[in-house]
Image (cartoon, rainbow, N blue to C red):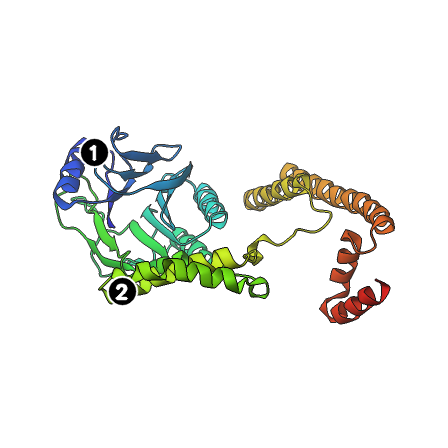
Amino acid sequence: MNVLQANMHRSKTADALLTQMITERHYDLVIISEQYKKKENGIWIEDSSGTAAIWAPPGSSIHISEKGHGSGFAWARYNHINIISCYLTPNDSIQDFQDKLDDIEDTAMNLEGPFLMAGDLNSRATEWWMPITDSRGKRVLEMSARLGFIVLNTGAATTFRRPGCEETTPDITLASEGIAGTIKEWKVLEDYTGSDHQYISFIIDSKNDGLRKKMQCSTRKWNVSKLNSEALLSEINAHGSEESSHNNAMQIVETTMKMISRACTKAMPTIESNRHKTPAYWWTENIAQLRRTCLHLRRTYTRARRRSAAIEEAQLYQAARKELKRAIEASKNRKWKELREDINRNPWGLGYKVVMKTLGPWQNHQSLALKKWTT
């Protein structure tokens, strides 16, 4: 995937040149800061303030499966990668700057998969070839460390070049450790852009994307103890002859593995992934929502405390914690009564499972023996 990172600085000229540059160099995706106007053609995703956008131009094969936005950033999911475009204005106070970074981090924490984050962060750090690291740069680096981001900027080429002003590098590219190695040919373009910023281009090498291959590999597991050998052999015999028509070794391997996978699926049931573990017996959707609310208010209180005493935020957070605690206790009491009633009806039902889970796996053999003896 050929990607262009463009800071247009609200320039009409830059907007016109951008379209031509995409036509000439066939960019699949454009990560934009300070856009001149919304593009009506292709796929366009914009932040709430109109300062950051992601654009898949007409003719691009990019398919966006999910998308979202906040203040100063927009995000989209392509394939397995979450792409974030951001612009943090230098006019914001340091606290507003931090709040926007926190919002970006919150969004990233709630999304699965690796990330590519690019844009104008208006901060300085030696990691992207600036002589010093300022307060904003330090905060960006701290966020990057928590999210596992790597700075992709290489070389000393600056991206902001206005006559009579100091050349700097406010435009940076960050990527998760898992995909940083798949990003090739990162460079600052020397073309005339019509903006005060030079554009950045790079390629996400999907052909050699090891993480993508790993994520695309089937995580299916079959319950071998329930294997129907006759069904397995029947399926293989029925379709095995179809695979011999291929001459290419790679095709033979690929089609054979698909045939085996189909046969296994028909011959035995699958085992559920551990990601879908049964929740606690007292867990409810209402408690889940209260927990999310509590987490949100805690973040709000933490940020407000940097500016002031945050008395109101503290009270809201404390009230949310109490409500969550009360909901958990009430649910436990209610469910425990239900479990006791269930035990009277079915000694080996949910109540039995909850107790054995509490006792731990070392009790399994004793419980099985007791169960056989009583039945």
- Residue 190 location in percent, x, y? 14, 50
**In the rendered view, does 328 fall on the left or right side of 29?**
right
Image quadrant containing the C terminus: bottom right
The residue at the point 44 percent across, 58 percent down is 235
Q: Nearer the viewer, residue 262 or 156?
A: 262
**In the rendered view, does 211 fall on the left or right side of 230?**
left
- Residue 8 location in percent, x, y? 23, 38
Q: Which mark is residue 258?
A: none
Please give the residue where the numbered disc 1 appears in the rendered image. Answer: 11
Q: Say what secondary structure mark 1 lies in.
A: loop
Mark 1 and mark 2 residues within 8 Å of each other at the beta carbon: no
Amino acid of disc 1: Ser
The residue at the point 50 percent across, 59 percent down is 231
Q: CA distance from mark 1 to mark 2?
A: 51 Å
Q: Nearer the viewer, residue 269 or 236?
A: 236
- For marks 1 and 2, the one nearer the N-term is 1
For the residue carrying disc 2, how many other residues have a C-alpha within 10 Å: few (<14), some (14-19), or many (20+)? few
Residue 270 occupies quadrant: bottom right
Q: Is residue 120 above or below residue 368?
A: above
User: Residue 9, can we see it?
Assistant: yes
Amino acid of disc 2: Met
Please give the residue where the numbered disc 2 appears in the rendered image. Answer: 250
Residue 360 occupies quadrant: bottom right
For the residue carrying disc 1, how many other residues have a C-alpha within 10 Å: few (<14), some (14-19), or many (20+)? some
In the image, which is nearer the foreground, mark 1 or mark 2? 2
Q: Nearer the viewer, residue 177 or 282?
A: 282
